Amino acid sequence: MSEILALSSELIRRASVTPDDAGCQALLAERLQHAGFACEHLHFEGVDNLWATHGSGSPVLLLLGHTDVVPAGPRDAWDSDPFEPAIRDGNLYGRGSADMKCSVAACVLALEHYVAAHPHHQGTLALLLTSDEEGDALHGVRRVAELLRARGQAIDWCITGEPSSTAALGDLLRVGRRGSLTGTLQVHGVQGHVAYPDKARNPIHQAMAALHELSARHWDDGYESFPPTSLQISNIHAGTGASNVIPGSLEVLFNLRYNPSWSAPQLEAEISALLDRHGLQYELRWHRSGEPFYTPEGHLRTTARRVLAEFAGAAPEESTGGGTSDARFIAPLGAQCIEVGPVNASIHQVNEHIRLADLERLPGLYHALIHELLA
């Protein structure tokens, strides 16, 4: 069994459903300490985080990942135990195989091999792992980033091992992500009998025009390689279940995925002004998941493009699509951030898997990126 397959299998066997790390970080920290890394375990509100470094000074290159996974779902829906690695048809199956325990294992091996060959390398190599990426993401990288900022810890480049490839390893280079902003809107009315609307105030009727304007609004035309900002209403709830009762309140849940044309405070102000203009009586709560980030042309992006082209046989697509990642907490520290990882076709699904051929090449991919960036 190869080194990468053995380590990936050890991680998959640990049922680290978010926010439980299930011993993954302790296993990896022991290896990294043996390789000469200084390891710091950071625990916040039941979340495990590992900060490991080797070397000193600049540039600072960070490899970023998570050890937690989403729940496996019904066991009988899987063809094998989701927490027992299984090899079938040239694939390694198990929860977290693609998202992202194999990437974490590959990053650790790449770091071990690089410092063994270059013990006096320039700058600082760092690894940051959390068990709170798939959950609320409140006490993982978000909290560690706050600590790093307070310490004055600079980060020049960040490579996140999220599964970013679409069909073949290295065919996509993610160079940014949209921001995510969620609003919970409570529109207040007056409950009453449907036969006496003059004695009630229907919040559904009152909110319809405002919601239509929100859903139909053209926010922008995009930003460089980012798609246009979009707003989607995901939940609407009102009423008692009776057909003859005008409801007293309406709750609307919506989310914006936005590009760098906007910031969260700007969007919040725009939407509040719209609701005020429609004369609604309302309360509005916001949850800011993260601001957008973008890595322009520079040493990191140029190097990654060249390395991925060698692995994929063609220049990668460069994208800012997808949802969010923990890089959104590292970018505000001044870091340029990219995401490079295995094919994402099976993530969060039953029978999640990674191709064995891709798994075997993954440590070499991260090693090449480290070598070229610190050369």
Image (cartoon, rainbow, N blue to C red):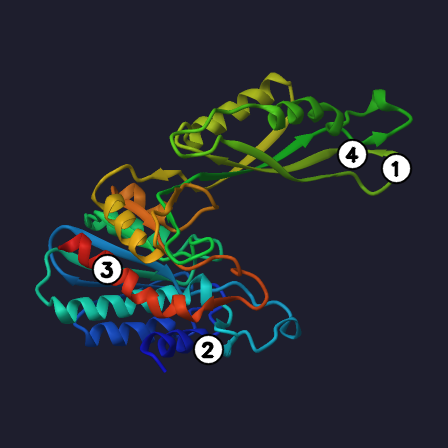
* Mark 1–mark 2 CB contact (< 8 Å): no
Of the image marks 4 and 3, the number of the one nearer the N terminus: 4
Mark 1–mark 2 Cα distance, whole angstroms, equals 52 Å
Mark 4–mark 3 Cα distance, whole angstroms, equals 61 Å
Q: Position of residue 144 (x, y in %)?
A: 31, 54
In the drawing, what numbered circle is on residue 243? 1
Q: Residue type at mark 4?
A: Pro
Q: Residue type at mark 1?
A: Ser
Q: Nearer the viewer, mark 4 or mark 2?
A: 2
Residue located beneath label 4 in the image: 247
Q: Quadrant of the N terminus?
A: bottom left
SS category of the residue bearing label 3: helix
Q: Nearer the viewer, mark 1 or mark 2?
A: 2
Residue located beneath label 2 in the image: 13
SS category of the residue bearing label 2: loop
* Mark 4–mark 2 CB contact (< 8 Å): no
Mark 2–mark 3 Cα distance, whole angstroms, equals 28 Å
Of the image marks 3 and 1, the number of the one nearer the N terminus: 1
Of the image marks 2 and 3, the number of the one nearer the N terminus: 2
Q: Nearer the viewer, mark 1 or mark 4?
A: 1
Residue 225 position by quadrant: top left
Q: Position of residue 112 (x, y in %)?
A: 22, 70
* Mark 4–mark 3 CB contact (< 8 Å): no
Residue at image position (37%, 64%) is 103
Residue located beneath label 3 in the image: 368
Q: Is residue 109 above or below residue 229?
A: below
In screen coordinates, is 350 left or right of 296?
right
Q: Is residue 144 visible?
A: no
Q: Quadrant of the C terminus?
A: bottom left
Of the image marks 1 and 2, the number of the one nearer the N terminus: 2
Residue at image position (40%, 78%) is 10
